[in-house]
Image (cartoon, rainbow, N blue to C red):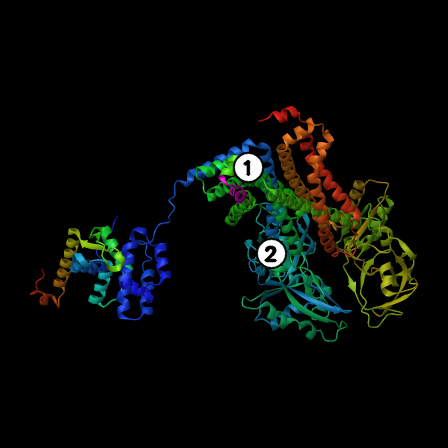
Amino acid sequence: MKETKLGEFEEVILLLVGILGEEDAYSFKITKEFKDQTGRSVSIGAVHSTLSRMEDKGFLTSEMGKATSERGGRRKRIYSITAYGRRTLEMSRDFKISLWKQFPQFGFEFDGLKFS
Amino acid sequence: MLKELLKKEKKIPPKLANRFLHWFLRDDLAEEVEGDLEEQFLACLEDGSLFKAKLNYCYQVLNYLRPFAIRNSNLVYLNQFSMFKNYFKIGWRNLFKNKGYSFINIGGLAMGMAVAMLIGLWVYDELTFNKYHENYDQIAKVMQHTTANDQIYTGNQHPFPLSDGLKNSYSEDFKYVVSATEIQEHIITNGEKNFNELGNYMQVDGPEMLSLQMIKGHRYGLENPNSILISRSLAERLFSNEDPLNKIIKLDNRDELKITGVYQDVPKNSTFHELAFIAPWDLFLSSNPWTKPYLDKWGYDMSPVYVQLHPNAEINEVNHKIKDIINNNVGDEFYNNDQKISLHPMDKWHLYEEFSNGENIGGNIRFVWLFSLIGIFVLLLACINFMNLSTARSESRTREVGIRKAIGSLRSQLIYQFFSESILVVIFSFVIALALVTYSLPWFNEVANKGMEIPWTIPLFWMTCIGFILLTGILAGCYPAIYLSSFQAIKALKGAIRSGHLAIKSRQLLVVFQFTISVILIIGTIIVYRQIQYTKDRPVGYNRERLISVNMRTNDIHDHFEVIRNQLLASGTIVEMSESSCPLNSYCTGLGNFDWAGKDPEFLAGFSVFWTSPEYGKTIGWKLLDGRDFSREIASDQRGMVINQTAVKYMGLENPVGQTIRHDEKDWTILGVVDDLIVGSPYESVRPSIYMLAPGVSQVASFRFSPEISTQVALERIESIFKEYAQGVPFEYQFADKQYAKKFNNEVRIGKLSSVFSILAILISCLGLLGLSSFTAEKRTKEIGIRKVLGASTITLWKLLSKEFIILVILSCIIAIPFVLYFSGKWLENYEYRTNIPWWIFAYASLGAVLITLLTISYQAVKAALMNPVKSLRSE
């Protein structure tokens, strides 16, 4: 049985894959972006392992990009979110919002906010 | 361009890390990962130093050590199981194809393993001696080292106050201090039943210290002086099925004691295994009133003392603290020697029991080493057989190896194959060896005087067995496995491989090794038996025939001595009877404080003293060399003494008879001198001894039967007289000749064991030789055929085939001689009275070895030589 739960780190990575888009969603860039966005340093290996795990779960697909003159002509593996991955992300977000709404002190502050 | 630039400045990722990455990384990930890492490296380089970038690179590489990224081993495993099945099948077929060789292989190996297992059990038993007692690592025996005449004598008898002294002064070190008597025979009586049983008296803590397993009652059952603890087997004999607890039994026909506990019999590999009962120490003191004056005297050695240390006490420190306790307390009683004490830990009692000059010099551990060595060697012999035969037979399997290699067997697979074959044989042999051990264990137990069992239920035993199988299998199989698998496929298929010079040389070397060990064992055994025979032939100094002795534990016989003697003499049952303080087979009293004319005042003289009745000499038949024997008629003989020849030399007397000796403030006259009697060990020199007339009760009665009546009748008559005068005392007697023979038990045991082992060793070696010679004969069938056609006689052929092996065996004999000389010389040094090692032993043993070899190989040689050349040349 494959685990289909979305962990915190996985969720962030998944979001980053979406943000970076078709050109830049490969291990090195995602790692860099993760550091820039969160300020937490993480190794490429850790990110790569998470990516391949999420690929196994079906949240991501990947394919090799085209060879460029960069990095000695080596190709990159570009990741993109699947529909299932997107739905899981949304469910995760909705779940959290519903939790926030039940949270007594801060619930009202989020009332006016809109999420798309 | 950028890359070239980088290269110039050596700004490339660390090579080692990169190689490491490639080594473990899955091939399909290599491209992307390397790309990512390089990008990272460059990014890092822009931010900071080259060193930092390199460090970061290494860090990133290490972080790829994750399950998803690591490659699987590049060998794809097929179904190995079926391959192994095939190996076993081929191995099995090979066994059955060559029944003779298989028999030799399996039989030889089984014998070797059985010997190794028996010896292993024996060594285990020896090493676990006394470990039955839970606190064996904290229990110790107090030893006393006395310096006299510049020699240190070590003993375990101590003055009575020592135990309380230790207890009171060093209570922080000792948990228990227990005085006990030596284990001796006593009479135990329950109503009509009476037995002579071995037991001792102990202080209250004794049973707790020895952690006896109580079946009934408790360990502190000795608190009341009228109580007794008995062993389970004794309880069964005394009461069969009744509950023995709180029953009253009689000890030595005198003390009525209540049974307060029954303990499980102590197993045979414990110093206390004979203990059938334990009586309270206080009872010993109260029923032996002679002990009273010595209770507070530090100058008289009386009884053993055992201690148990506290768990945190360190034995060396305690030794240091207590060593002078006797010296400090003895005051100026008449002994003025240096008497140090030390503790001898329980786990050393059995294997390191000998002391020389105050130092522990080992003991039985020698035999543990000796027999372990023999066991290992016999096993090695059997393994060598296996190796020899397998390599010799390898030539007939070269084709198989060639085909396997051609089909694609890896060398490692061939090695597996031969190992699995040898393990198959070893498992076979192991099963047979196990059966052999099971059947021979009772015999072995009897010879070795042990109570060993095969520990079927102990997992350690099975683990050892499996380890043993693997070890033997690998040991026996490694040479063929490595040698056979090294053949080149093409050559093997062409049949171009002949076992080379090296293989033949190594085979010869192994044969020499085997026979050297066998010859060493054989000569060693001959020397052991020679030593025994030599000592048995030593003149004993008295007549052992028709002589019995009876230990007297009550005064009944002594009180009616005259009546009994007259009755037995009148009925013609005996020639003579007498009493003595010591049995014929041990020195039991040693006394000092003797003075005579011409004695060096510095000399501390000590003699073994025997108190006897006047007819003692006549009863045992000693040989008077000078002077006269005691006489009943001469009243002054009460102050006379008879001494042995050694004593004359010891005292340095010219004309001993008639001289006066001062002892105990009284004068004694030497009446006669007798030839030395062997009382102690026949391997030691006789101690200077003095015989005096007994003033009081004696311990042993001796009877010499009249030659006119049968022993049976004489025994019956004496028993009926015993029943008449000593009621409730079991009549138990010992024949002097049997008693004497017991002195050889240890050596006879070694002799028996080593003869069995050496016979097995030579048998195994011969089996190997038989296989090897039949193999050579087979190999040379054609050659022999041609020689016969050309006119060679059978004798010539026989010589041709035997010569090679005979030379090897003679060589082994020569190699064996220095080893034997060294080891047997060492062994004989243990004996004061010892035989020499004459040259003819070597000649005979070598001759024997050559003869056995000839017999073994002649069968094959003659068979080959008698073969019809037409047949042998036509084959193929």
Bounds of the magenta segment = B481-489
Left or right: B872 in relation to B615 = left
Q: Is residue B204 above or below residue B457?
A: below
Instruction: Please say if the residues under marks 2 and 1 sit with CB atoms less than 8 Å apart.
Output: no
What's the residue at 82%, 45% (across, down)?
B546
Residue B69 location (% of width, % of height) = 31, 54
Q: Is residue B691 above or below residue B299?
A: above
Residue B496, label in figure: 1
Left or right: B497 in relation to B20 = right
Q: Nearer the viewer, residue A82 or B138?
A: A82
- Give the quadrant of residue B653: bottom right
- Give the quadrant of residue B680: bottom right
Residue under numbered circle 2: B130
Residue B714, label in figure: none
| Residue found at the very far top of the displayed protein | B870
Instruction: Chain letter for mark 1, please.
Output: B
Q: Helix, strand, or loop for circle 1?
A: loop
